[in-house]
Amino acid sequence: MEPNIQIPTCGRIVNYIPVLPDILKHNNHSFIKALPAIVIEATDLYVNMTVFSLSNPAEGRYSVPHISVVTKDEHGNALLSYWEWPSRG
């Protein structure tokens, strides 16, 4: 587990960052930065969550990795959808 990353507990809100093709399902625009999600269960840096969007009903996502453990391409872009804590401020 990565140091200094707080593991979310049930009920906490995190950002879900979709990566293609999931991004197309949640957005009628060219891209989306983040969707709000409520944590249902967390195991280390993998989270089960309910994701909310304006264009679709809430839906579950399972074993979503934190950005720190997601596989990235040679340019540093995530290859899978991931979660992260919302920024403060």
Image (cartoon, grey):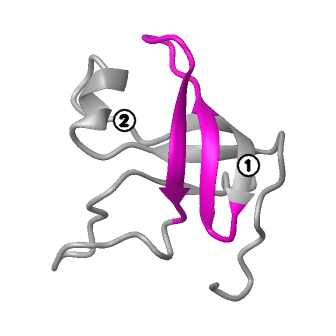
Q: Quadrant of residue 27?
A: top left
Identify the residue at image location x=28%, y=73%.
72
Q: Which residue is mark 1?
A: 41
- The magenta stretch spans residue 86: no
Q: Hey, which residue is sitting farthest bottom in the picture?
A: 3
**Residue 32, labelled with which disc?**
2
Q: Which sits earlier in the primary sequence, circle 2 or circle 1?
A: 2
Q: Residue 89: x, y in percent? A: 75, 52
* Looking at the image, residue 8 lies above or below residue 32: below
Q: Amino acid at mark 1?
A: Glu
Q: Residue 66: x, y in percent? A: 54, 65
Q: Which residues are magenta?
A: 43-66
* Quarter occupied by the N terminus: bottom right
Q: Residue 61: x, y in percent? A: 51, 38
**Helix, strand or loop at mark 2:** loop
Q: Residue 24: x, y in percent? A: 25, 27
- The magenta stretch spans residue 52: yes
* Looking at the image, residue 77 lies above or below residue 61: below
Q: Is residue 8 left or right of residue 74?
A: right
**Helix, strand or loop at mark 1:** strand
The Cα–Cα distance between marks 2 and 1, rounded to whole angstroms, is: 24 Å
Identify the residue at image location x=38%, y=51%.
81
The number of numbered badges drawn on the structure is: 2
